[in-house]
Amino acid sequence: MIIDQLANAGQYYGLGARIEAALRYLQDTDFNSAVPGRCDIDGDQVYAMVQEYDSKPKVEGFWEAHRKYLDVQYVAAGVEHMGYAPAANLLAGAYQQENDFIKLEGDGEFFLLREGYFCILAPQDAHMPGMAIDQPKPVKKVVVKVLL
């Protein structure tokens, strides 16, 4: 897992052309006027999902991980708690190939994902996104899916 400010994204271009494309998209897009939905960057190899939601209490959250894609999650507005745990430390449910999703159970840590920050989550990085810090608050987030 990587956590950093979007201003430092160029330091991570060397991780691969698709990750670079994801980070450049985040750097080059004005999300103030972006509407929720999917945006293809490079077809199914790299695409973004703009989301607007209220963060939710941790009791409503669940751990997830992916196999085919890694996530670059960027908070364009607001702040949330992001859960993180090594997927190997959690009990995995069945893999849902059609949507590249594994639900997991167990415990992990939480960190603040603030406006202007991104995190890169690889398949070994179980995560619980969208959690409220104290009370639910509005968040605008962009999740870029990068095919491995």
Image (cartoon, grey):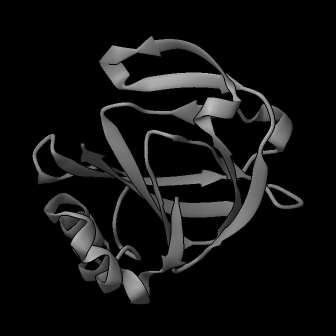
Residue 48 is situated, as x and y percent measured from the top left of the image, at 29, 53
Residue 75 in sight from this viewpoint: no
Q: Residue furthest front?
A: 88
| Quadrant position of residue 127 | top right
Q: Residue furthest top?
A: 94
Q: Residue at x 75, y 46 (%)?
A: 56
Of residues 74 and 77, the one nearer the viewer is 74
Up the image or down, 90 lies above or below 49; here it is: above
| Quadrant position of residue 34 | bottom left
Q: Residue at x 25, y 62 (%)?
A: 19
Of residues 58 and 63, the one nearer the viewer is 63
Q: Residue at x 59, y 51 (%)?
A: 53
Quarter of the picture holding the C terminus: top left
Up the image or down, 60 lies above or below 75; here it is: above
Residue 66 is situated, as x and y percent measured from the top left of the image, at 43, 33
Q: Residue at x 24, y 81 (%)?
A: 28
In the image, taking residue 72 as reference, residue 133 lies left or right, namely right
In the image, taking residue 40 as reference, residue 82 lies left or right, namely right
Of residues 23 and 76, the one nearer the viewer is 23
Q: Residue furthest right?
A: 134
Residue 138 is situated, as x and y percent measured from the top left of the image, at 66, 61
Residue 81 in sight from this viewpoint: yes
